[in-house]
Image: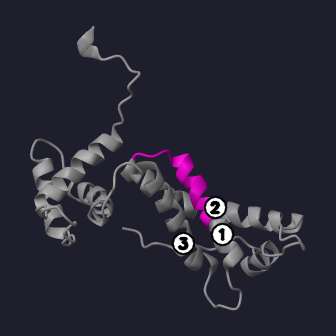
Amino acid sequence: MKPKRAYTPPAGYDERALIAAAQVRTKAGKPTPRALAAQTTLLRQWTPAIAKQAGLHARRRGLPFDDLLQEGSLGFLHAVNKFDLKQPWRLWAYAYRWVQAYIRNAVMAAQLINMTTTQADRQLFWQAGAIEGRLGLTGDDSEDCLVRVLVQRLRSEPKPRGRPRRSKEQIVRDFLVKRAAALHPVSLDAPRPDLD
């Protein structure tokens, strides 16, 4: 296996000068034309790294790659505007977290809006996809295996007021039903095959 090579910028590429140019604003707070050109140059330079992060989430969650790439690019531009040139680290070391945050917010907006109601559901959402991918779960026993693993990882949920506490297994099974419904939406306008 080849060792990973560190990113090497092309000759004549001065990242710090481009960041400084990208942060210039007019009196109204809008970027100058030179700042927009610098932002475009930085974005083009770092698009492969942003695309890699977007691709990971697109494969795991089944969301459109282009949408996640666009969200990651917005996160990168936000990081460029907030980057402090006095710090010794490189731009990507700082921008990585912003790219991840914007992509995760897009994933949550796309899939979680109708699905999660509790902290346990949000916790399970992020763990379920990773566990399925790592274990390669397929077949009849895949759901039972996923339930066992998720029950072990689930932190205890606070007891809701006025309702009995649910078991961890019941929380996981309820979550999997909600997730299946969210990942495979049903249209009320579509004809039902059993009525033909």
State which mark lies toward you, 3 or 1. Answer: 1
For label 1, the SS is: helix
For label 2, the SS is: helix
Give the camera-side residue of 174 and 8: 174
Within-10-Å neighbours for mark 2: few <14, some 14–19, many 20+: some
Residue at left offset 52%, top offset 73%: 97
In the shown orientation, is residue 143 left or right of residue 86? Answer: left
* Amino acid carrying mark 2 in the image: Leu
**Nearer the N terminus, badge 2 or badge 3?**
2
Residue 164 visible in the picture: yes
Residue under label 1, please give it. Answer: 78
* Amino acid carrying mark 3 in the image: Tyr
In the shown orientation, is residue 55 left or right of residue 95? Answer: left
Give the camera-side residue of 15 and 182: 182
Within-10-Å neighbours for mark 1: few <14, some 14–19, many 20+: some
Q: Main secondary structure of the magenta part?
A: helix
Residue 46 on image: x %, y %:
63, 65
In the shown orientation, is residue 196 left or right of residue 96? Answer: left
Residue under label 3, please give it. Answer: 96
- Where does the magenta region start and end? 62-75
Q: Are marks 2 and 1 in contact (CB under 8 Å)?
A: yes
For this orientation, the residue located farthest to the top is: 196
Distance between the Cα atoms at labels 2 and 3?
A: 12 Å
Q: Which mark is residue 74?
A: 2
**Nearer the N terminus, badge 3 or badge 1?**
1
Quarter of the picture containing the C terminus is top left
Distance between the Cα atoms at labels 2 and 1?
A: 6 Å
